[in-house]
Image (cartoon, helix red, strand yellow):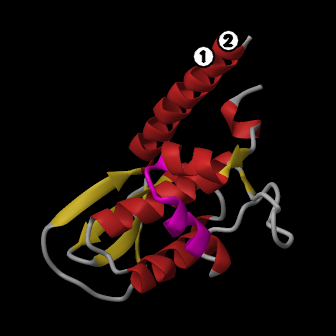
Amino acid sequence: MNAISMGFSGPSVCRIAGVTYRQLDYWARTNLVTPSVTAAQGSGSKRVYSYADLIEVRVIKSLLDAGVALPRARQAVNCLRDQVGGDLKSVSLVLSGSNSVLAYTDGEIIDLLKGGHGVFNVISMDSVTADIDTSLAQEVETTENRRLAMA
């Protein structure tokens, strides 16, 4: 089974994307990132996230790490969803201070937050995807090693 068709538990998403469970839980409860595979249905149920959800979680983490406040990161992610749907790999985020814009690969730039000047930092969606793939491979290897040790 390839990574894109797998489902991931909350703790796995946290390890792979580099966020805390508390962050992920809050983002799910406030509909910033909702699990695409299985949503929580009451006490004791487990959320199951898709590969695309992992990418969104890492994008949000990258925005927060770059100094974008959570409400502005939420606005940026919602605009991203509106502009490109689920194809986040086709874009790069360009950050100007705490203001972000969406840059299409053909050079067209759309302002996600309406404003901002300063030095630009680029977050390549290819590098985000590569980071997720590397973390995912490590997670699969660790899980397999645990299974073998228990056998």
Q: Residue furthest bottom?
A: 114
Identify the element where label 1 is drawn: helix
Whether label 2 touches label 1, CB < 8 Å: yes
Figure quadrant of residue 98 = bottom left
Q: Which residues are magenta?
A: 17-27
Figure quadrant of residue 45 = bottom right
Figure quadrant of residue 142 = top right
**Relative to the observer, which residue lies in front, 98 or 64?**
64
Residue 18 in magenta stretch: yes
Q: Is residue 49 left or right of residue 136?
A: right
Q: Is residue 67 left or right of residue 7?
A: left
Residue 60: x and y in percent read 45, 65
Which of the numbered marks, if any, corresponds to residue 148?
A: 2
* Residue topped by disc 1: 145
Residue 119: x and y in percent read 13, 68
The quarter of the image holding the C terminus is: top right
Q: Amino acid at mark 1?
A: Asn
The quarter of the image holding the N terminus is: top right
Residue in the image at 34% along x and 74% along y:
100
Residue 136 in magenta stretch: no
Above or below, comparing residue 60 to residue 133 in the picture: below
Identify the element where label 2 is drawn: helix
Q: Main SS type for the magenta part?
A: helix
